[in-house]
Amino acid sequence: MYKNILIPVMLDQSRNTEASLKAAQALADKGAALTVMHAVVPPPVYVADYIPMDYIEQQRGDMQTELEKIAATLPNCRTALVDGSAGRAIAHYAEEHGCDCVVIASHVPAMSDILLGSTANYVTRHAACAVLVVR
């Protein structure tokens, strides 16, 4: 069905990543390219000066290792570790890399999500391709 699928994951919170991976596999054409992606939100400027640079690099390395573990469970899967707010980074990455589908896990929305918006909500409104939200 789809040839280039983006699967955003949150490494620091428990989301239904397994369901996203299974859904992406079910939607993928034979030989489809899959990308497991995590967006890293940079620390605020007023905090950044107090965080050692080697700590930030170590954290990025740990995130990349986790992404590679997830990608190893899927055929023809690569990883992407990008900087920026999650919703914007996902929509931008999907457009820049010609993704034809984004499979994203979501949680049951809370009142704050209705007022402020969630990542999945942002992606469904701004992605230039199909979006499947998995709960």
Image (cartoon, rainbow, N blue to C red):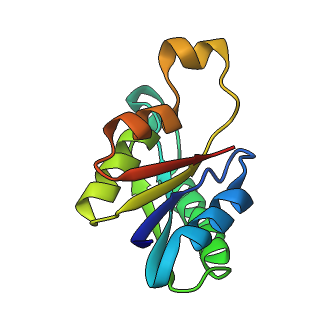
Residue at 60% of width from left, 14% of height from top? Answer: 112
Placement of the C terminus among the 4 image quadrants: top right
Q: Quadrant of residue 73?
A: bottom right
Residue at horizontal 47 percent and vertical 37 percent from the top? 43
Q: Nearer the viewer, residue 18 or 130?
A: 130
x, y percent for residue 77: 52, 80
Query: Residue reaching furthest front?
Result: 1
Which residue is situated farthest in the left direction here? 96
33 left or right of 7? left
The residue at 71%/47% (across/down) is 15
Q: Is residue 96 left or right of residue 104?
A: left
Q: Where 115 sits versus 126, above or below?
A: above
The residue positioned 59% from the left and 55% from the top of the image is 9
Quarter of the image where one finds residue 22: bottom right
State the image coordinates of residue 88 (x, y, percent, origin top left): 35, 41
Lateral position of residue 134 relative to residue 118, left or right: right
